[in-house]
Amino acid sequence: MLKVINDEFGVSYGHVETVHSFTNDQNLIDNFHTGDRRGRSAVLNMVITETGAARAVAKALPELAGKLTGNAIRVPTPDVSMAILNLTLERDVTKEELNAFLRNASLNSSLRQQIDYIESAEVVSTDFLGSRRAGIVDGLATITSGNHAVVYVWYDNEYGYSHQVVRVLEKMGGVSRPFFPTPKG
């Protein structure tokens, strides 16, 4: 998501907030943990904690190194998470322009196997269980003001991640499967 946004609009600065399902690193009941706050019950609490997401993005997209910060809120759900991309762009953008661009990227870009787009007032986290995409933009939640944009991205942090690992392994192995829709151009 950040790649296509940066390529089209430029990212001057950003903060990535993940609202993340609890993980096996957390305790199910209040107990000792070496990480701040993570000793509290994962199934009963929202827990503010650190994340390596911003650093990981900088490794994959060196052009964003030093431009992103990030943290996580672990929530008492077993699967499906959300990334909130709070971005200062290099130019002004409207909600309509940004959403049209992201919708088009989900259908016609080389990243269409990673990006999806939805506009539905009915969706909640469990609707994204089993999604193969790295992220699904929730277009109705997009906010813009001048060069500031907030983009909400759902993802299945288990199956979706696993599918992306398989996609990378296929690419490394030279395996190419048909995928529809095919990009325009």
Image (tube, helix red, strand yellow):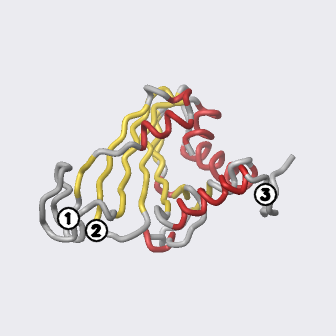
Report whether residue 139 is seen. no
Position above or below: 50 against 67 = below
For numbered disc 2, what is the local secondary structure?
loop
- Density class for disc 2 (Cα within 10 Å; few <14, some 14-19, many ≥20) is some
Position above or below: 176 against 111 = below
Residue depicted at x 46% and y 52%: 152
Report whether residue 151 is seen. yes
Q: Earlier in the sequence, mark 3 or mark 2?
A: 2
Position above or below: 108 against 89 = below
Q: Earlier in the sequence, mark 1 or mark 3?
A: 1
Position above or below: 182 against 78 = above
Q: Decide: marks 3, 2 in contact (CB < 8 A)?
A: no
What amino acid is at disc 1? Asn
Disc 2: which residue? 76
Q: Which residue is farthest left?
A: 31
Horizontal and vertical percent position of residue 173: 74, 53
Disc 3: which residue? 175
Q: Decide: marks 1, 2 in contact (CB < 8 A)?
A: yes
- Density class for disc 3 (Cα within 10 Å; few <14, some 14-19, many ≥20) is few
Residue depicted at x 79% and y 52%: 174
- Density class for disc 1 (Cα within 10 Å; few <14, some 14-19, many ≥20) is some
**CA gap, disc 3 to disc 2?**
38 Å
Disc 1: which residue? 45
What amino acid is at disc 3? Val
Q: Decide: marks 1, 3 in contact (CB < 8 A)?
A: no
**CA gap, disc 1 to disc 3?**
43 Å
Horizontal and vertical percent position of residue 87: 45, 36
Q: Which residue is farthest right?
A: 185
